[in-house]
Amino acid sequence: MWGLVRLLLAWLGGWGCMGHLAAPARAWAGSRGHPGPALLRTRRSWVWNQFFVIEEYAGPEPVLIGKLHSDVDRGEGRTKYLLTGEGAGTVFVIDEATGNIHVTKSLDREEKAQYVLLAQAVDRASNRPLEPPSEFIIKVQDINDNPPIFPFGPYHATVPEMSNVGTSVIQVTAHDADDPSYGNSAKLVYTILDGLPFFSVDPQTGVVRTAIPNMDRETQEEFLVVIQAKDMGGHMGGLSGSTTVTVTLSDVNDNPPKFPQSLYQFSVVETAGPGTLVGRLRAQDPDLGDNALMAYSILDGEGSEAFSISTDSQGRDGLLTVRKPLDFETRRSYSFRVEATNTLIDPAYLRRGPFKDVASVRVAVQDAPEPPAFTQSAYLLAVPENKAPGTLVGQISAADLDSPASPIRYSILPHSDPERCFSIEPEDGTIRTAVPLDREAHVWHNLTVLATELGWSWGLEKSWAPPPGANSPGPLLQWRSGPHPHPVSGAPQTLNSSAQASRVQVAIQTLDENDNAPQLAEPYDTFVCDSAAPGQLIQVIRALDRDEDGNSSRVSFQGPLGPDANFTIRDNRDGSASLLLPSRPAPPRQAPYLVPVELWDWGQPVLSSTATVTVSVCRCRPDGSVASCRPEAQLSATGLSTGALLAIVTCVGALLALVVLFAALRRQKQEALMVLEEEDVRENIITYDDEGGGEEDTEAFDITALQNPDGAAPPAPGAPTRRDVLPRARAPRQPRPPGPADVAQLLALRLREADEDPSVPPYDSVQVYGYEGRGSSCGSLSSLGSCSEAGGAPGPVEPLDDWGPLFRTLAELYGAKEPPGP
């Protein structure tokens, strides 16, 4: 066993290290007062405790902080000390021979506060552990090297104005990275550098509070407070940091509204309608937001009848408007008082009130030419539909308030009656129909009627000019100047260049008449299963009546009658009817059934119509869904099922396939007997199924086809030759024309003979030449040196130049005459 391991602490300069060494355990035997066998206790080789290293050391060389030593180390150099763990080999190094531990660089506690290491002594030769490993901790001792900082600064805070002393504003917090458990390096104290005497700060907590009462936002709205945090408990030598707090005083309703003047004067023209703005009033309130919102009211009853006042959308101005029509001739001015009041009042500041103010208002009414006034603000008229043009609808009336004797002219604005359905009498305002009306097309007609005041040049109109700054009295209708007859005497007069006009809305309702027969609401195309029980509901049909009084509930239905009817109709008496199967089911057929339905209303006069409902008899699945309709019905009538029909179609298809195959094989066999045609007619080959008997066999093939046709015997008279066998004799050939032969004409002649000869096989590519060559009894195929007749003496040679331009090249090659002999 190893003995004691000692830790030597070194103090170099101002840098110290402290450690704790545990005394070695000793073996002991027995116990005081308890005899018996000796009890042995194994001692531990060493026990480590934590020790400290001062941070931020900046010495020139590594510092010795301790030494490891084992009792088994006799100084012979056989013991090696090892150090592992955090920072081993980089921050902390050990001398393997002596066990001295050094720190190689400056340490920062804020980066790492402690290091956990493992020490062990081993044999240098075999690396066999001499002692069990032991763990120890090195703590970095803090020094005051970090100033306080405010991580959340700068700060912004709000406090109501007029707050009491000590009202909490905000709490600031500083942070010091030094160790708070060691010394006063992290003990902070807060003070105010700037912001006195308005605010104070708690030295320990950093809570900022108001220091004076009644701080007024209207005097100063914002304050900048500088707060300092200092460590070392605020003593000399401590480090400090500062931040700013911007304190804003929020508004409270501590100021009442006040009118800047006691009297307000306005003017308004008498033609101003209700809602016309007369003027604005504003009471001043230095408060902000909702604390400055005001409500205005008219205190006197005289003014509240003719005018009204409201607050604008901002809640600051009072809008004075006309409440009812004004008349200059009746009253020319109004005087009343207006009160402005804060809408939100804080009871805590009632002592600073009252929060309202009063001002006087005078409104002068100005005279103005007025347009004609209608007896009603709007007209509602009615006329039946389908009436003849010129039917009276109603009458409207207007009058000139300034001059009741002035004539009024009426007209309908074209855009309100684009179809020209109505006309109006210009003098008396009588409205009549211009065309027959249809209620189903248009129920309402909204007309705009214009009434124009006519002012005459002899001075019936009064002159008027709006006051400066006043609004225009209303729309003016421009007229062309020119002679017009006087309404009484008929003398030509001249209209003024402008005239007052007013408009009114005339709503004309077209009254309904029973002029539309009821119809089905939609085209009905339904089906019924062929297995449906008698009396089953097929379809519910509904009616539609376009007339106003002819609603669908007043429409009656009637279907086919009699015992032979395939379907029946039952009237539900609510504008609908039920299509039912009769007791006798409808016979199936391919075409759908067309069920006639008669509909009539109960109007005056009674109108009726007839419609049809299409019903198909279909084959249905067990769940009631349609499987098939008309084709299945036909199959059922013939007694054939779907499987039988498929079998029949399959058989017919197989038969057709066999017929097509047989025809193809037969055609292929016939084609094998035909001449194989090629592009060059000289290479055609005629094949036969018969095998020849040799040169002496003259029965298998007619050799006369290759003989000279001129020497061939004429065919014997008799029955016409067959076209399906090779003829025994050929048709007579036309004689060759005398004189120089034109080869092109000769070939054309032979081609025509071949086309017209009924005895030759129908092979277009077969050509028969009557000359085989020199030495043959038929003569040569070439015209050069050919004989006039078989075996005869050579005749005169025809010059090649006479054969035409097609044989020009051949004439150049063979046309030269041989030179005479010597």
Image (cartoon, rainbow, N blue to C red):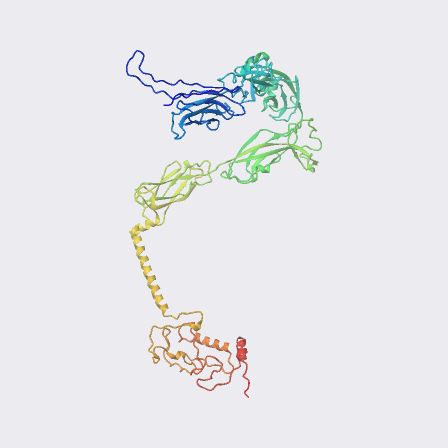
Which residue is nearer to you in this view: 428 or 295? 295
Image quarter in which the N terminus is found: top left
Q: Residue at x 67, y 25 (%)?
A: 367
Specify the quadrant of the image occupied by residue 288.
top right
- Left or right relative to 1: residue 430: right
Specify the quadrant of the image occupied by residue 659.
bottom left
Residue 422: x and y in percent read 56, 38
Residue 350 vertical placement versus 435 (above, below)? above
Which residue is nearer to you in this view: 216 or 327? 216
On the question of residue 29 being in view, the answer is yes
Residue 409 vertical placement versus 223 (above, below)? below
- Left or right relative to 623: residue 342: right
- Left or right relative to 652: residue 51: right
Residue 68: x and y in percent read 43, 23
Residue 24: x and y in percent read 38, 18
Q: Residue furthest right?
A: 458
Which residue is nearer to you in this view: 629 or 723? 723
Image quarter in which the C terminus is found: bottom right
Q: Residue furthest bottom?
A: 822
- Left or right relative to 590: residue 320: right
Specify the quadrant of the image occupied by residue 537.
top left
Task: Tell how many labels.
Answer: 0
Which residue is nearer to you in this view: 768 or 234? 234
Residue 86: x and y in percent read 45, 27
Q: Residue furthest front?
A: 76
On the question of residue 173 being in view, the answer is no
